[in-house]
Amino acid sequence: MQQHSAPASDPTKAPGAPTTPVGSRSPAVTPARGPTGSASGSSFTPLQDFEGTITPSDLHFEVHHAGVPTIDPAKHTLLVHGLVDRPLLFSLGDLKRFPQVTRTCFIECAGNGVLAWHNGPFGKPDPGLTPQQVAGMTSNSEWTGVPLKIVLDEAGVSRRAKWFLAEGGDACLMARSIPLEKAYDDALIAWAQNGEAIRPEQGFPMRLLLPGWEGSASVKWLRRIELGTRPWMTRWETATYTDPLANGTARQFSFEMDARSIITTPAHPETIAPGWRRISGLAWSGRGRIARVEVSTDSGLTWSNARLEEPVRSKAHTRFTHMWKWEGGETVIYSRAADETGYVQPTRAELIRVRGAGTQYHFNPVYGWRVLPNGRVFFYGAT
Amino acid sequence: MLVSLYGGCRSGGGGAGTREPKRHYGLGSSATAADIATRDVDVAPDGEGLPPGHGTPNEGQGIYARQCASCHGTRGEGKPPLYPQLVGRDSIAEGFRFGKDPRLSKTIGNYWPYATTVFDYVRRAMPLDAPGSLTSDEVYAVTAYLLSANRIIPAEATLDSATLAAVTMPYVDRFVNDDRHGGREVR
């Protein structure tokens, strides 16, 4: 009898691996967040490695102010107090007994895009940036939880309450003041992300979820909600996450994320070949649905509408694609998103003109990728 | 119709098109005064939440030197980009020019709109390697030191719940509410 010890290179000539308790990516596929290792810092999601719209949970971008806490879900409770009739404590089990909602939405850090603006010589964005570095502080997930208003009604909110403080159980007790209207609009207390328990980096065992608003307001590891008449003016809504303007003021409570888009392929560090290829990217708006994404393949001379992949969800990443025949010449390709409010993603120059060169958060310009005749692709940020 | 039992059919985030009626579920357990007191650490600009206690810049200087200076620098000059500058009223950044120049460093003295935020934040989060370890007197003292080093309060001041809530920061009037509303105009 012939021995069946087939070479490993031919998977049809030997049985494959057995079943396993938890799957893993192919060894040939190695997407990674970066930079890593900082407890009070950020780590960007590899946008260029994704298809569709959902960010794999283990690659969701991270921003923490005092690291990721280790929380025992059996001991964790959420306290609701302040201007309420009945101060209440909720365990995770209590919250799971309420009616629940599942919705897909993005979470984006207010600082997304800052690296592309401030990196390198002032005003000269670094051509070596990748989609991950340019816009990797946004991620899109299917979130499950209880509408915040149901939990608040359980405690009985006083008519005098206008704001609430949301506080996390991490080592800085991260806290943000949120207008009460958002609670009665679409805020959730979420405990699941993409069909399973929220990951520790995203707020296990429960987090606030404020669709469309800057990520820092969706307080992770939620342990306390206090109802009050006015904002508390925490460090994260005064010293940070405020927007200085050229007129000598600083915008505060700038929660909503304006529309943004980014082409994720072709992008740096790809090298492309002449002929037909798909341009693909993501667009999103904190104010509703994406109405259209325009793409230019001739350095901004002409623009055409990209195809939006269904479903186009409110406050969620939307995938756009556009077929392009590259003839081999030098060009810059751009994407420009518009949302259902009529907002059109501005250029970098326009943002700096209306806000001043000191603008930092909420920096959402149209960006491009420069394609050289040899097919190499570089970030083009000077729009 | 089934839908009418639910008091109308408005499309919510759930996708089914029906809403749960507003009702009391009786879930959760009563929070006691002690449950609230152990967690309720926040301080507001009107002074609500400030605990009893007091401290002076002089007392705070020693605490700062022992527990804060290793990261934030001997005089609060910071070690960018990891450790923020806390003290600074130099003429370049003075005048709230941050909107014009992203290289200017924000400090408690040249940017923070409320003095109570210093107390609130330090009590929550600092020192980074031992958050929550300072007593109320120590937080008052180190807050007094940081405000005095930023030339907000005199070196001989004493901070307590009343005097801290009474401090007005130089640039509080510069903070305005968000005026972006979507639509065609870029702001």
Image (spheres, rainbow, N blue to C red):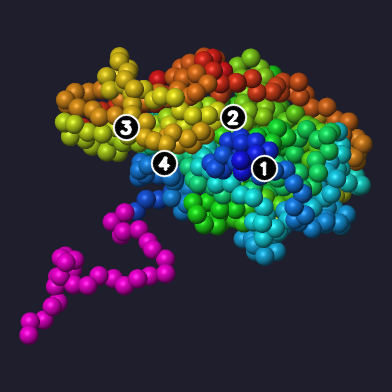
Q: In this orientation, which residue lies closer to the viewer: A116 or A294?
A: A294
State which quadrant residue A355 falls in. top right
Q: Are marks 1 and 2 in contact (CB under 8 Å)?
A: no
Callout 3: SS? strand
Give left or right: position of A272 versus B54. left
Q: Nearer the viewer, mark 1 or mark 2?
A: 1
Q: Is residue A93 among the parts visible in the rendering?
A: yes
Task: Name the kind of residue labelled 3 in the image.
Answer: Thr
Q: Is residue A382 among the parts visible in the rendering?
A: no
Q: Nearer the viewer, mark 4 or mark 2?
A: 4
Q: Position of residue B53 (x, y in %)?
A: 91, 47
Q: In this orientation, which residue lies closer to the viewer: B115 or B71?
A: B115
Q: Position of residue A45 (x, y in %)?
A: 44, 44
Task: Name the kind of residue labelled 4 in the image.
Answer: Thr
Q: In this orientation, which residue lies closer to the viewer: A344 or B67?
A: A344
Over which residues does the magenta segment extend?
A1-29
